[in-house]
């Protein structure tokens, strides 16, 4: 009988849907995804959950501003989040929405258990309330004014259900002592322990002043308030009341930002203890990415978006940077400069260079096959020993959530391989049988090292390691490697290698940063069309309506209108592909009076080399714009052919002078 796999259940926070994901959310989700891949390679049955927290007064208000029902507002938001995660390769196993029926049932069930066990009572909550914003205010402005709208606040008393958090001071402190690894990192643990030691107040868990929430059964108009609703999503994702069937609860680790650790390590285990359900095994709080030493936030205008970075450098580059740059659990600085520097030094020159060098030498010298190594010299043995040792170290670092150290250890092996190749100089060896054997040994050694490094880096760099793995001749995916069985010496001589695909093309730093910033700017301030303005106002993606100006398509124009468009004959001087923009070519075009840089969306149909010298029609008086962050000063005219709109460049049968105007 097959041995049952050990389970591992990991969660990101259930993100609040009042905006779209930035790099902070991306960071948590990247860590969760990386751990999921890693644990699978260690033989675990893994479930990763993420989702959207969709209730509360902020959603109520945002939906009102957008003039749509709350349900539609949150449906669009959830879709936008899910789409972005899919696009970034961060699709979770479970995506839970707090408006899902299964979640509603879970919250109501949890409440009933807490109530039956005597930990819930009805009482009164009194607080300062802004009638305009429909919210309690905990930190009023001087003169009891609302910090949001500056209107005078009123003292309001409402009937609430309370959770007897005060009864859990001792149980929680005992729990922290019994499971010393429950709160990570250590610094956060001390903070929480002293908070609980200071005494716990009972917690109001329902509201009657909010409409958009999960109803308390039989107690309308009571709805559940924030944490009693949101935290339960971790449980509803894996079965809710029937959690035992799925076998995933308790969670092995909740990943959270340090601002919400208290709710996860005090409220959440207390709710579960009150319901006699098992608390999670661990809560890991990470720090912030800071720009100019300020926490990133939309209101400060220093928000970093994932998409432009991924367009420019690839998702693996972003994953690598986030995990390598800071010690997990601490704050770190985010800068595009550091990002691009690491990309070039560690990825392009490091892993990328080792892979392409090894592939090229094997292709050239051994007809694309793994050679049979000969007798080993001490330097071969030393490299083998160091690499074998690194396997153990890397796994240990991953297990301790020391991701930066794990990557450091992997890259130390890559550096050792570079040094080895530089010293051994396999390219300088001749054709004698001895020298061929020596060459085979050196190249087998570097290919074997590359294999091990690739398997170890896979959880962090899923896309690029998959490419290297194919190049090494494997048909099974690298994700299927069992890390516990990874050893030096498993690379089989005679294996036919696959085709090598370049991993990380080097980029020029200033240009790369400019383009990332331009793309981010475009995303934050989309061009003002009617549809996108409405969407931007409500932080919503546009609802996908077709443009309303179809009537204009067949409208006739006067000759004066046509004369406004200045078209001239241009000649292509240079053409190149653009990293991060599959469809675009960057051209320089001579238009007679000057040389222009123009981007054209023709990369899938025209080879850059074939365009040089070609005469084209250029619209020269178009306002400059940026495409994927690259400035384009003019437009090349092309026919749009077939259902896919394949571009065919306009040209001339006879020779025409560069700069001639089309009339
Ligand atoms: Zn207000």
Image: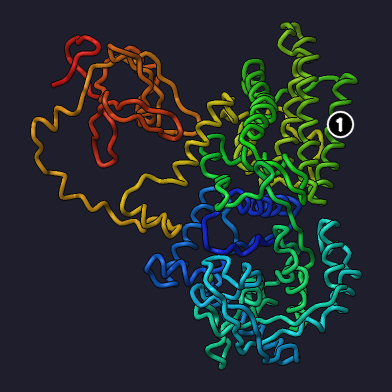
* Location of mark 1 (residue): 386
Callout 1 secondary element:
helix
| Residue 445 visible to the viewer | no
Q: Residue at x 59, y 26 (%)?
A: 509
From the viewer's side, name the closer residue of 169 and 411.
Answer: 169
Q: How many marks?
A: 1
From the viewer's side, name the closer residue of 551 and 447.
Answer: 551
- Would you say 525 lies left or right of 557 here? right
Position above or below: 561 against 86: above
Image coordinates for residue 58, horizontal then vertical, percent: 52, 69
Position of the N terminus by quadrant? bottom right
- Would you say 389 lies left or right of 133 here? right
Q: Residue at x 55, y 39 (%)?
A: 309
From the viewer's side, name the closer residue of 451 and 271.
Answer: 271
| Residue 148 visible to the viewer | yes
Position above or below: 267 against 537: below
For disc 1, the neighbor class at 10 Å (few under 14, some 14 to 19, many from 20) is some
Image coordinates for residue 38, horizontal then vertical, percent: 72, 50
Q: Residue at x 73, y 6 (%)?
A: 430
């Amino acid at each position: 009988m097959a041995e049952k796999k050990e389970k591992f259940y990991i969660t990101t926070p259930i993100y609040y849907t009042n905006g779209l994901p930035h790099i902070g959310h991306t960071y948590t989700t990247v860590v969760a995804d990386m751990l999921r891949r890693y644990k699978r390679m260690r033989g675990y049955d893994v479930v990763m959950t993420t989702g959207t927290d969709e209730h509360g007064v902020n959603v109520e208000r945002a939906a009102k501003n957008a003039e749509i029902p709350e349900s539609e507002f949150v449906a669009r938001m959830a879709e936008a989040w899910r789409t972005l995660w899919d696009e970034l390769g961060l699709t979770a196993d479970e995506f839970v929405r707090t408006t899902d029926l299964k979640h509603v049932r879970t919250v109501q069930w949890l409440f009933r258990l807490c109530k039956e066990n005597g930990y819930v009572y009805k009482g009164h909550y009194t607080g300062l309330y802004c009638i305009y914003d429909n919210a309690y205010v905990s930190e009023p402005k001087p003169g009891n004014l609302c910090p949001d709208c500056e209107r005078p606040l009123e003292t309001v008393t409402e009937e609430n259900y309370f959770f007897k958090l005060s009864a859990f001071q001792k149980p929680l402190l005992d729990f922290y002592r019994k499971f010393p690894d429950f709160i990570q990192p250590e610094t956060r643990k001390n903070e929480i322990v002293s908070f609980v030691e200071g005494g716990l107040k009972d917690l109001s868990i329902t509201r009657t002043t909010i409409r958009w929430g999960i109803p308390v059964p039989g107690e309308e108009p009571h709805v559940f308030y924030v944490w009693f609703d949101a935290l339960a999503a971790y449980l509803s994702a894996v079965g809710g009341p029937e959690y035992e069937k799925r076998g995933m609860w308790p969670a092995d680790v909740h990943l959270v930002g340090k601002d919400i650790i208290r709710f996860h390590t005090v409220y959440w285990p207390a709710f579960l203890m009150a319901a006699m359900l098992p608390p999670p095994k661990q809560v890991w709080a990470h720090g912030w990415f800071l720009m100019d030493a300020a926490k990133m936030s939309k209101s400060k205008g220093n928000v970093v978006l994932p998409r432009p970075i991924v367009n420019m450098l690839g998702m693996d580059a972003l994953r690598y940077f986030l995990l390598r740059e800071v010690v997990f659990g601490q704050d770190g600085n985010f800068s595009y400069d550091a990002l691009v520097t690491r990309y070039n030094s560690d990825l392009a020159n490091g892993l990328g260079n080792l892979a392409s060098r090894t592939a090229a030498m094997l292709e050239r010298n051994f007809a694309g096959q793994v050679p049979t190594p000969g007798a080993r010299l001490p330097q071969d043995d030393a490299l083998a020993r160091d690499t074998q040792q690194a396997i153990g170290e890397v796994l240990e670092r991953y297990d301790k959530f020391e991701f930066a150290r794990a990557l450091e250890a992997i890259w130390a092996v890559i550096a050792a391989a570079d040094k080895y190749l530089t010293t051994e100089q396999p390219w300088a060896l001749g054709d004698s049988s001895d020298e061929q054997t020596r060459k085979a040994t050196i190249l087998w050694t570097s290919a074997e090292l590359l294999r091990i490094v690739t398997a170890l880096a896979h959880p962090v760099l899923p896309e690029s390691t998959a490419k290297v793995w194919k190049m090494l001749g494997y048909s099974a995916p690298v994700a299927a490697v069992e890390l516990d069985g990874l050893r030096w010496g498993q690379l089989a001589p005679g294996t036919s290698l696959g085709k090598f695909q370049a991993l990380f093309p080097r980029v020029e730093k200033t240009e790369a940063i400019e383009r990332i910033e331009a793309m981010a700017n475009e995303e934050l301030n989309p061009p003002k069309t009617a549809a996108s303005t409405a969407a931007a106002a409500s932080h919503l993606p546009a609802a996908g309506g077709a443009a309303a100006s179809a009537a204009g398509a067949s409208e006739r124009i006067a000759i004066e209108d046509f004369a406004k468009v200045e078209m001239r004959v241009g000649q292509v001087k240079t053409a190149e592909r653009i990293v991060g923009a599959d469809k675009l070519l960057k051209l320089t075009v001579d238009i007679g009076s000057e040389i222009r840089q123009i981007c054209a969306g023709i990369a899938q149909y025209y080879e850059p080399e074939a365009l040089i010298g070609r005469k084209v029609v250029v619209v020269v008086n178009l306002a400059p714009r940026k495409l994927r962050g690259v400035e384009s000063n003019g437009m090349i005219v092309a026919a749009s052919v077939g259902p896919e709109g394949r571009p065919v460049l306009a040209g001339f049968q006879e020779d025409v002078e560069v700069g001639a105007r089309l009339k």
